[in-house]
Amino acid sequence: MSTTDKVNKSVRDTVKSAEDFIESTKKSLQAELSKTTPKVEHALDQSLDDAGRALENALKSVEEKTSREQLGVLNGYRTFLQGQIAFVDDRIRAIKKG
């Protein structure tokens, strides 16, 4: 086998090894994501449920306040929600860039 053939074989072997490594890594990541995604979804669902209950309680208490107090609480809540929306939008953009 000539030197050129040896180099070509070595390059082919290296490329094949790299391809195998990439495929193995891809499969490992997919397996890990399939385990993690349900946990993340559950955590998000739980957080949203908790936030919904907190909002319901807050709105009930707001109804007992004066109009001025209600405006203050509702404006504060709107600001909070806008921050949450900005966080979600940033996260979505980061994932899409991924």
Image: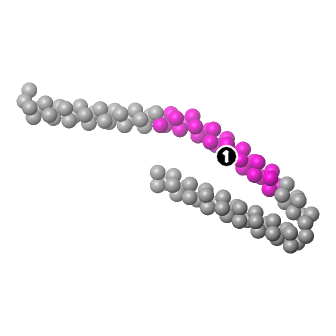
Residue found 64% across the figure and 43% down from its top = 41
Q: What amino acid does circle 1 point to?
A: Leu
Q: Quadrant of residue 38?
A: top right
Instruction: Residue 14: say if magenta.
Output: no
Q: 19 or 82, which lies in front?
A: 82
Please, what is the dominant secondary structure of the magenta stretch? helix
Q: Position of residue 39 (x, y in %)?
A: 63, 38
**Residue 40: within the magenta?**
yes
How many tags in the picture?
A: 1
In the picture, residue 12 is in which quadrant? Answer: top left
Residue at position x 88%, y 59% from top? 61
At which x and y percent is residue 14?
A: 25, 34
Residue at image mark 1:
44
Q: Residue at x 71, y 65 (%)?
A: 79
Is residue 49 toward the left or the right of residue 33 in the image? right
Q: Which contiguous range is marked in magenta?
A: 29-56
Is the residue 93 above or below the residue 40 in the image? below
Residue positioned 43% across, 37% down in the render = 26
61 displayed left or right of 37: right
**Quarter residue 69 falls in:** bottom right
